Amino acid sequence: QVQLVESGGGLVQAGGSLRLSCAASGTFFSINAMGWYRQAPGKQRELVATITAGGSTNYSDSVKGRFTISRGNAKNTVYLQMNSLKPEDTTVYYCNAEIISGSYFTSYRYWGQGTQVTVSS
């Protein structure tokens, strides 16, 4: 079984920083894109940032210039460095990964359990 385990959420004052981490574990062939999404209560899950296996990144306009996504050397981890945090960044953040596994090298999309980020004003 493949699992994504997140860490690093918490409470921070506006203008502060947090770093989220997500590690994939289990049996799989490789990982393509990884990313971070967030979802506020009653709203749809929205993209925050993604990064491909080759290192190409994509950010939502709301976090561009403040957040940085990166992958670890082992390529099974993804990080989200969040700077200049705002109260409107408060919500649950989810890690996502496109993982190749199985005898037929099928791509599956996995989600982490979510980590709460709270930014106080």
Image: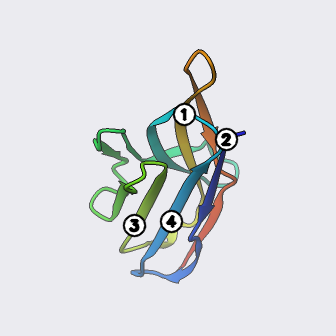
Residue 121 visible in the shown view: no
In this rendering, is residue 86 above or below 23? below
- Foreground mark, 4 or 2? 2
Crowd around label 4: few <14 · some 14–19 · many ≥20 (10 Å): many
Query: Between 80 and 100, which is closer to the camera in this rendering?
Result: 100
| Element under disc 2 | loop
- CB of mark 2 within 8 Å of CB of mark 3? no
Q: Which mark is residue 2?
A: 2
Q: State if disc 2 and disc 1 touch (CB < 8 Å).
A: yes
Q: CA distance from mark 1 to mark 2?
A: 9 Å
In the image, farthest residue toward the right: 1
Q: Which residue is mark 3?
A: 81
What's the image's color scheme?
A: rainbow
In the rendered image, the vertical position of residue 73 relative to residue 51, given as above or below: below
Q: Quadrant of residue 103?
A: top right
Q: Earlier in the sequence, mark 1 or mark 2?
A: 2
Q: Which residue is mark 1?
A: 99
**Residue 78 x, y percent position in the rendering:** 46, 54
Horizontally, residue 54 falls left or right of residue 88, namely: left
Quarter of image, res 91: bottom right
What amino acid type is highlighted by mark number 4? Leu
Neighbor class of circle 2 (other Cα within 10 Å; few <14, some 14-19, many 20+) is some
Q: CA distance from mark 4 to mark 2?
A: 19 Å
Name the residue located 36 percent from the left edge and 74 percent from the top edge: 84
Q: Is residue 57 visible?
A: yes
> Can you identify the residue that label 4 sits on?
20
The residue closer to the viewer here, 26 or 87, is: 26
